[in-house]
Amino acid sequence: MTFSLRSSSATRKLLSRYYSTKPAPPRRSTSSGILPPPKLNYEYLVHPSQAINARDRNVNLPERTFDALQRDLNAWKTTTRSADELRARQSHIGDSVRVAATPEDKENALRKARALRDSVHAHERELSRLESSLLAYGLRIPNTSHPNVPLGPEANARVISTHGPEPILTDNKRDHNELNDLPGMKFFDRDAGVVSSGAGFAYLRGGGALLEVALIAYAMEVAVRRGFEPIIAPDVVRRDAADRCGFIPRDGDVKGEEDAEVRIPEQMYSVQCKHESGESGLVLAGTSEIPLAAMHAQALYNPQTLPYRTVAVGHAFRAEAGARGKDTRGLYRVHQFTKVELFSVTTGETIKHTGSEVNIDKASDHELEYLRELQIELYAGLGIPFRVLDMPSEELGASAHRKYDIEAWMPGRGAWGEISSASNCTDYQSRRLHIRHRHPREDSAATGPLPYAHTLNGTAAAVPRLIVALIENGVKFKEGGDLECLVLPSVLRKYWVGGEKFGEIEICWE
């Protein structure tokens, strides 16, 4: 028996590597950037609850998707068993070739070996075809909804809490478009954006630009103070990464097997580049959620290091095809904006539950509440009226298991407007990006494949809409109707570098 002796420093490194409670850089099996195919749980996807879930979400799936998935899964199992049997026979034939007594016996054995080889290759080709078909159908199926998610369209969203001061009455004078035209108040310019970039782009100017800087710093401080690692992520991502995060083509872009044409999701801008094409082609990120998720691709974590929380400043690019109406006039709906994004990776589930058995006490369920609490703290500090909604099934998107939206009251618009959301994506993204973790140390009986982690995302600051909410709620008028000052929250004061004025308007810090 031999013993391997290690120095104390080597022992500390070993213990740190496997049992450190600090997030470590993820270990990946490739640096090429090309990821292996997603690893879906087809037994789970063919469960009857999945068809009900897709219907509740009003997902536009090709006809007979689940029948085709079950058919291909059964065929894959049969073909796999047959291929295994053929490979076992190959081993016996190999023995026959080696012990053949005569040339004729050897030739007969070789002939049988070649026939078996051809048959194995045919089975492998069929398995490859079936796996491609399973993946094509499986990738279209959305995540399972949390049991407490309201059913139906956006109108069925459930308000779970309200915060901040009493909402101001609707007042057209407070419309940020009208305020932007007042002398000394100019804080954005869409006309210049049309010239430089096209309709739907805007410049932030003067106080608007400084307010963005302050909001970014404030949101980053709140998140970092709560343990989020600060990140500056790329704004350009591979189309494949966007697909794996759930930003898939919608409606008419969903085609059957007969149409293998690559489609870019309707709300994403593609980037023309001679070095990247097809699945490795590039798009502008619709949210930093995509590069943050991709940062964890093919990672294997120790569960003691989770949750792993990150916060990123980036730009969001939204084509918003077909958007119409008054929201296209100002800052509420623009094609490019700055966003501070939260992202978490938590432990997953060793056993995948289905239907009424869905686990509602997962680590990711608790993490979603943590994100919601952080967002409430952040927006409460801004002193604006806002409410939290539990979004219904038809508003979840492909990747979300459950989603909270936060809406701020905007008196100039005369409506509540979404300023934030937080989503639990469970293992939807991690199965596509191959994000896993080791079995927990306390679960000594755990065996089998390593669990897939759960991922969550949330908005800390969607800057233009926060600017709209702050300005429409913050302006004060004199008795004659002239603008007196702009009230801004004191939490932003230490990040404000424009003196005591917003453009030429006095700031009142409260």
Image (cartoon, rainbow, N blue to C red):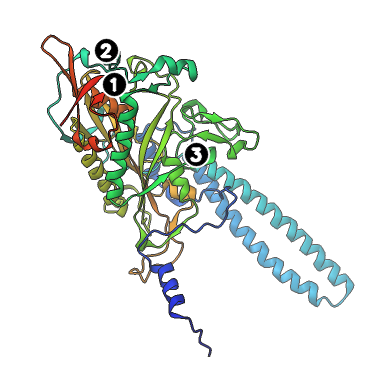
Q: Earlier in the sequence, mark 2 or mark 3?
A: 2
User: Disc 1 versus disc 3: distance between alpha carbons?
Assistant: 42 Å
Q: Considering the numbered disc 2 on the image, is that residue within a helix, a strand or a loop? A: loop
Circle 3 Cα neighbour tier, 10 Å, few/some/many (<14 / 14–19 / ≥20): some
Residue 68 position, x and y percent, is: 52, 41
- What residue does disc 1 label? 503
Considering depth in this image, is 244 or 23 the residue closer to the camera?
23
**Who comes first in sequence, dot 1 or dot 3?**
3
Quarter of the image where one finds residue 494: top left
Q: Position of residue 192 (x, y in %)?
A: 43, 16
* Residue type (three-letter) at the residue carrying disc 1: Gly
Circle nearer the viewer, 1 or 3: 1
Indicate the amino acid at tag 3.
Asp
User: Crowding near pointer 1: few (<14 within 10 Å), some, many (20+)?
Assistant: some
- What residue is pinned by disc 3? 243
Residue 477 sits above or below residue 93 on the image: above
Position of residue 436 measured from the top left corner of the image (x, y, whole percent): 44, 57
The amino acid type found where label 2 is placed reads Leu
| Residue 416 seen in this snapshot | no
Say which residue label 2 marks.
182
Work out whether residue 39 or residue 290 is closer to the camera in this orientation and state it: 290
Q: Is residue 25 left or right of residue 156?
A: right
Which mark sits nearer the N-terminus, 1 or 2?
A: 2
Secondary structure under badge 1? loop
